[in-house]
Image (tube, helix red, strand yellow):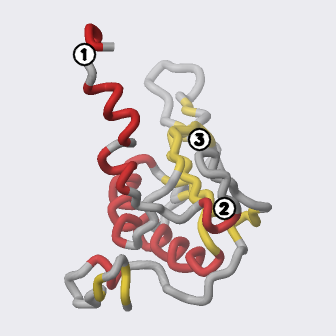
Amino acid sequence: MWEFGHKRSMAPGNLAAWGMPQTQRTDTLKEVIAIIRPERWGQTKIRLQRLRVLAFTQQRVLGRGRERGLRYLPRQGASHPATIRYLPKRMISWIVEEAQVEPLVKAIIEINQTGQLGDGKIFILPMEGASRIRTGERGVEALRAQPSFDLLVGHPASRDQTSLSPSSR
């Protein structure tokens, strides 16, 4: 396979081998939302970097599921048991092409499954569309990374303005 003018190696140690499947591209987008234990977020992020799923939105949330929070045995002499009604969780959202959904979901499950209550949930939603504000691109093209010389070193016009001293303006 050729990528950016160079033949891409599929050697076992190469991250390209961990990449998402290069199947027929479609314009179907999906949103994958995962609610996981906060202590599993670091491992999940590392695994998804190997899959080259780099764009996400994450936030710290509080919630509860069927476990209804935590209950502690009452202290000696206490009238009610101590409870924590809402547990801290991490909610992460990805917008991906339909072909990327299954590998993404499998990776999330592999990392976060402990077999205990509170492991979390994954939701898969259809997306109507996406637009990149900077360029106006729509659909799948709005999600694809565009390595650009201007992005790496800065736009030439902005570089000229910042290199001028205030007295020379």
Q: Which mark is residue 31?
A: 2
The residue at 45%/65% (across/down) is 53
Image position, residue 29 (x, y; %): 69, 69
Q: Which residue is mark 3?
A: 69
Q: Quadrant of the N terminus?
A: bottom left
**Outermost left residue:** 13
Disc 1/disc 2 C-alpha distance (Å): 46 Å
> Do we see residue 66 in this rendering?
no
User: Which is nearer the eye, 140 or 57?
Assistant: 140
- Residue at (29% x, 83% y) in the render: 6
Q: Position of residue 153 (x, y in %)?
A: 30, 46
Q: Is residue 39 visible?
A: yes
Residue sitting at 35 percent across and 42 percent down?
A: 154
Residue 150 image point, x, y percent: 38, 49
Front in this rendered view, residue 169 or 1: 169
Q: Amino acid at mark 2?
A: Glu
Point out the residue furthest to the right here: 128
Determine whether label 1 and label 2 are within 8 Å by CB.
no
Could you tell me which residue is drawn at 51 percent across and 38 percent down?
60
The mark closer to the camera, 3 or 1, is 1
Residue 165, which numbered label?
Answer: 1
Disc 1 versus disc 2: nearer the observer: 1
**Callout 1 environment at 10 Å: few (<14), some (14 to 19), or many (20+)?**
few
Q: Amino acid at mark 3?
A: Gly
State which quarter of the image contains the C terminus. top left
Q: Secondary structure at mark 1?
A: loop
**Residue type, numbered disc 1:** Ser
Work out whether 154 lies above or below 114: above
Disc 2 to disc 3: CB gap under 8 Å: no
For marks 2 and 3, give the CA distance: 27 Å
